Image (spheres, grey):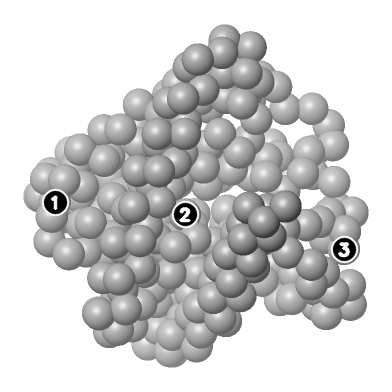
Amino acid sequence: MATGIVSVGLHLAGFLWAARVLLGLAAALWVALAVTFCALFGGAGRWREETSAPAALTTVAGTGVLGDGVAMISRPVAAAVLLALTAALWLALLPRVLGNLRWPVPGAAYMVTVATQAVAVLAATLAVELPARWLLWPSGAMLVLGLLLYVLVLARFDFGELVGGAGDHWVVGGSLSISALAFAKVTLATDGPAPLAWGTLAVLAVALTWYAVLVVCEVLRPRTAYDARRWSTVFPLGMTAVAAMTAGRACGVPWLGTLGEALLWPAAVAWVAVAAGAVRHAVASASS
């Protein structure tokens, strides 16, 4: 998820070689994680446990983001295959995760919105790239459902996570950023009718507000130790940048594109920092 969305952001900003490198890395990571996910079939008990947790929905979002990256390099048929897989995973996993949510929920619970909007974003992208205009209807339906799921999780969210979370608390804002991206994609695909443009800007405004709040919380309560959940911080940072750049184009607001390009750099720096932490952690684990 994190690597894929930073790749998409770099592509939008014009850094094509860097975007291709990260997209290739994202594809390799996707294959490795897919093998790991399939290995869970070996134990029924562990399968039920793992696929009932919100983190299971990263398979949906990660596949959708990879599909977006593949579509950007003019491979719409491959992206369509990934859309079908994204939708199938969403159908299989979302009911299990929703059925096991308990109050209060952590930031990872917002993955129910992220996964839903990942389907909406890729469907809207392919409605233009294939082209297949009929995909706009399911994309719009998923967009609305994703926002409703956001409200459901927000009502159960443990707001103490903002100052004590290990990284996944950022998804409270990132889930709105991908919702704004879905709005922007549908707006672009339908030639920008005013209600969709207003919806895009409204959702993006709330996402940017969350971004500011989360930055302040990080400053007031620094959490510098490595934690794998910090990848869930990188993803919202990158997603907010991509959403702003896309919304600027969809709504005819050029300064949003400039803002998105500026926000891409913190996402890239965070990606490098978390990747370095992951490598150090892996080396230390192997040594011990």
Q: Is residue 93 above or below residue 123?
A: above
Hey, what amino acid is under mark 3? Val
Pick the front one: 32 or 244 = 32
Tell me which numbered mark, 2 or 3, is placed earlier along the sequence: 2
Residue 76's label in the rendered image is 1
**228 above or below 115?**
below
Badge 1, how many Cα within 10 Å: few under 14, some, many 20+?
A: many
Q: Which residue is mark 2?
A: 1
Can residue 206 be seen from the camera position used here? Answer: no
Q: Secondary structure at mark 2?
A: loop
Residue at left 78%, top 38%?
105
Q: How far across and how far down the image is residue 44, in percent?
A: 57, 10
Q: Is residue 268 left or right of residue 250?
A: right
Q: Are marks 1 and 3 in contact (CB under 8 Å)?
A: no
Specify the farthest residue to the front. Answer: 287
Which residue is label 3 attached to?
Answer: 163
Q: Earlier in the sequence, mark 2 or mark 1?
A: 2
Earlier residue among tags 1 and 3: 1
Q: CA distance from mark 1 to mark 3?
A: 41 Å
Total labels: the figure holds 3
